[in-house]
Image (cartoon, rainbow, N blue to C red):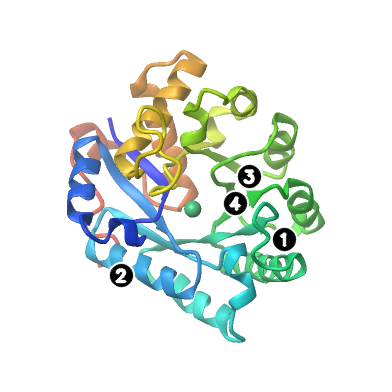
Amino acid sequence: MILFDSHCHLNDEKFAGDLDEVIKRMQDAGVLLCTTVGSDVETSRQCIRLAEKYPFVFASAGVHPHDAKDVKDDYLSEIDSMLRHPKCVALGEIGLDYYYDYSPRDVQKRVLEEQIELAYIREMPVIFHVRDAHGDMLDILKKRAHRLPKGVIHCCSASAEMVQEYLNLGLYISFAGPVTFKNAAGLLDAARVVPPHRLMIETDSPYLAPVPNRGKRNEPANVYYVMKTFCELHNVPEEVLSNITLRNTLNFYGLPQPEHEFKEGIFPYTNIGF
Ligand code: NI
């Protein structure tokens, strides 16, 4: 079984003290791939450095809505140059966050739309962060449905109805630890709507650790528990669900799917880009 943590933040300072042990546990748990996601120019650079260091780590570059208020005039060209890096597989995370409202909403929208356009031009997939803002996000995406890059709604918190609208726009949906929580009934209703070929799983670590590790620091090894929740939801074996989500995630990030290497259990990603 090979798992892909489609969204984590290995660059977070919470991992600074013991990253090598976190990575060892990740590999022991069968989580052989992950994408570490940037949230501004500096963290995106950190993510790319990690991806250069570890063959099984991929990176993304983008400006989170929290940081939209702080962008410099040249931020788009900075992001653009990082997108050219061979281990940078997506633009993100970008989006709207009206729960915290750390950046004014008009600034959040502007920085979001500028980055969507960049992703479209560069043909890069986009990682979307959306909190308490699904209505506005859907408006923005629908408005530019004819110029929409590939995208994923990460750490999905949308209702089943909203998820259906995202699916209609061709987006992938990724779920994190909250699907394992006791009060997750609404989220599970939304999860049921997602067809197998659009489903991705993630930890968003170090945040939002799934049950049974809720409340602790999260880490990529825990993506196993998110996967297990979907096995129970759809009544399918782990082997099937892990394979589906692995293939979706490789597909989403534009990574190769070498059939025979997987079968022989050989890890095929040591040479990507280097
Ligand atoms: Ni995140």
Q: CA distance from mark 1 to mark 3?
A: 13 Å
Counting from the top left corner in percent of width and height, residue 34 is at 35, 49
Query: Residue 72 bears which disc, if any?
Result: none
The residue at the point 77 percent across, 68 percent down is 106
> 67 above or below 178?
below
Lower sequence index among marks 2 and 1 = 2
Query: Residue 171 bears which disc, if any?
Result: 3
Q: Amino acid at mark 3?
A: Leu
Q: Nearer the viewer, residue 149 or 48?
A: 48
What is the residue that sits farthest to the bottom in this orientation? 73
The residue at the point 40 percent across, 24 percent down is 228
Q: Amino acid at mark 2?
A: Arg
The residue at the point 43 percent across, 16 percent down is 236
Mark 2: few, some, or many residues within 10 Å (few <14, many ≥20)?
A: some
Q: Residue tagged by mark 4? A: 151
Q: Residue tagged by mark 1? A: 147
Lower sequence index among marks 1 and 3 = 1
Nearest-to-viewer mark from 3 and 2: 2
Q: Is residue 86 left or right of residue 64?
A: left
Q: Residue tagged by mark 2? A: 49
Lower sequence index among marks 3 and 4 = 4
- Badges 3 and 4: C-beta atoms under 8 Å apart? yes
Q: CA distance from mark 3 to mark 4?
A: 5 Å
Q: Amino acid at mark 4?
A: Gly
Lower sequence index among marks 3 and 2 = 2
